[in-house]
Image (tube, coloured by chain):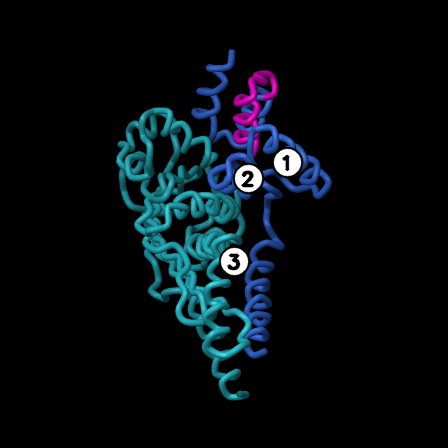
Amino acid sequence: MIFSKLQKKTILLGTLALTMIGCATPKNYEKFRAANPRSILVLPPKNQSTDIRGTYSFLSTVTMPIAEKGFYVFPVAIVDQMMKDNGLPSANEMHEISLKKIKEILNPDAVLYINLKEYGSKFVIIESQTTVVATGTLVATNSGEVLWEGTVRQVVSSSSNNSGGLAGMLVNAVVSQAINSTVDHAHNVSMTASQELFMTDGQGLLNGPYKPTEKK
Amino acid sequence: MILNSLKVLFLIALSIIFSSCVSSTKYYWGEYENLIYTQYKEPEKAIPEIQIQKLQADIQKAASKDQPLPPGFYAHLGYQYLQVGKAGEARQYFNAEKKAFPESAALMDRFLKKIK
């Protein structure tokens, strides 16, 4: 009993440590630094997962980390609505707009394209596992140059009370899945994923003009 | 038992991660991002009237904490007023966004031009 508890604890802490460290290859920030963008337009993320809620779950978590890094972030819901009003019903179409057109209408210094590769919960025997995997590409509006690219992978396991043997476990797994879909576990994972993607030192965005301290 | 303690441990770890990010924010975030999420997920719970009420409450709270409101906040509020036909308030908050963040000028001018 004790051992399995310890083992689980170790695995859990290991997972946490991994998600916090992220991938360790140092990034090249040369172009980012040279372009020195002030304002970032975040388009609604493309969604490759099967959960249609992914796009707007993730979109509603990006403003905080990017603004706290010191950038002006265009109001994401207004931008989304404007594009829909102009005949672009989904993120896929919005990602196709030319930079020239974007500059003309909104005039951001850079555009952030997010691709949601995985989003959602599934359950594995007695635990449910929620995964959010996303990539971000920041492109300079004037030159079309890629200023930054990043990837985040967050996997969070949540377990239910273990009582009543195998039958109890299965019931719990089903219940836990139901709870997960109502409390929107995946959205909470989106929040941590988004913060990690943009704010991790040495991997995320550089600091922008509204965060002038410790600018590298 | 074991799973319960694991859950607790995990929540503690999560809250540490969260608090380390949230405690020192430059901006007062309040309901802004929650409302955006809700307006897509359960639009009936984030109709413009509700959003206006919550965002106005955030303005008070931000002032009491002496923190600025984040990029997009005033624009989003102005947009809610526009939805319910209150042009005066809409104009006021589009201008507030422009004043706080000149980067928003192209977008805000677009709306301001529409209103007049």
Contact between marks 2 and 1 (CB within 8 A): the answer is: yes
Residue bounds of the magenta highlight:
B72-89
Q: Say which chain is cyan.
A: A
Asked if one can make out residue A216 in the rendered structure from this viewpoint, the answer is: no
Name the mark on residue A179. 3
Q: Is residue A120 left or right of residue B36?
A: left
- In the image, residue A186 above or below residue A91: below
Instruction: Determine the image quadrant of residue A141.
Output: top left
Mark sitting on residue B54: 1
Residue A197 appears in view: yes
- Amino acid type for the residue under numbered disc 3: Ile
Quote the CA–CA distance across marks 3 and 1: 27 Å
How far across and down, in percent of the image, does residue A20 sit? 46, 65
Q: Is residue B6 left or right of residue B65?
A: left
Q: Residue A135: image x %, image y %? A: 34, 52
Report which residue position mark 2 lands on: B35
- Between residue A85 and residue A122, name the one nearer to us: A122
The amino acid sitting under disc 1 is Lys
